[in-house]
Amino acid sequence: MKKVLKFTFFLFLVLLILFLIMDKPLPIGEEGPRAKILADKIQKAINKDAWDSTNFIQWTFIGRHHYLWDRKRHLVEVKWGNYAVLLNPNTLKGKVYINNIEQKNDAITLNKAYRSFTNDAFWLNAFTQIYNGNTVLKFVEMEGASSGLLVTYLNGGVTPGDSYLWIVDENGLPSSWQMWVSVFPLGGIELTWEDWIALPNGAMVAQSHKAGPFNVKISNLKIFQSWEDGGYSKDPFFEIIDF
């Protein structure tokens, strides 16, 4: 019993020390022209125009969630484990399959797929969403040649109210971000945006987001303009067109 109490107390101290060392207050920024200029610079650096012209994109998030996103019709296929979900994120309607067998009235799994897609698409290319919904943009002074854009999402997504400080280089390409989000108890956790690649149409995507030994990895990236170009023999979303 004493050993359990000692371990619990030690764990509490470690967590408390980590909280005191790592927890950061939300930085003070400046709304106005400088924030708007930096936001536009970021979107130019990641080639938002090319991203907007992309109809289909496939990717895998941290090796577990696999996506096919029809951006034009805003329909998505989400696969993990023995699950496959066809989903209309606007209506939260769709079809759920387990081991290729359709499940009836599975709203819980549809919502899980929606939450996963919303989160993982943000990690794929958050910078195209700077102006999505009701956002507050603030310019934050940084050391050296870097600049900071603090973006707070007042609504939309799964966890409205989250804030991100996007740290960018002199060319406007993001190198890391710090997060003040409801899913993490510590404020200002920082992860990198690196291993940038240009997709065939010129859109830029970062494939790695690292914090110490952890790596939020984006893999199996592929874009195409029609499902035929993607190698499909039929429309992968024909079952939920009217959903």
Image (spheres, helix red, strand yellow):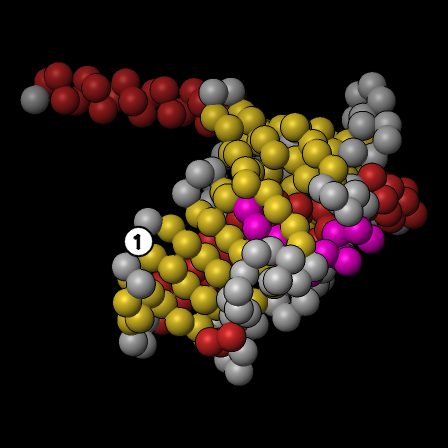
Depth order, front residue of 68/109: 68
Mark 1 belongs to which amino acid? Asn
The residue beneath circle 1 is: 82
Residue at the spot x=54%, y=78% of the render? 241
Residue at the spot x=83%, y=19% of the render? 144
| Mark 1 secondary-structure assignment | loop
In the shown orientation, is residue 63 left or right of residue 198? left
Quadrant for residue 107, please give it.
bottom left
Q: Where is residue 235 in the image (x, y as percent from the top left)?
A: 55, 69
Q: Where is residue 167 in the image (x, y as percent from the top left)?
A: 73, 32
Q: Does 141 sit above or below residue 88?
A: above
Residue at the spot x=83%, y=35% of the render? 172
Q: Quadrant of the N terminus?
A: top left
Q: Does 148 sit above or below residue 82?
A: above
Is residue 34 something one can see in this rendering? yes
Residue at the spot x=51%, y=34% of the render? 216
Depth order, front residue of 14/225: 225
Sort mark 1 into few (<14), some (14-19) or many (20+) by Cα contacts within 10 Å. Answer: few
**In the image as oriented, which residue stretches furthest toward the left?**
1
Q: Where is residue 79 in the image (x, y as percent from the top left)?
A: 41, 54
Magenta stretch: residue 97 in it? no
State the extent of the magenta-drawn residues as a range.
Answer: 49-59
Q: Does 192 sit above or below residue 124?
A: above
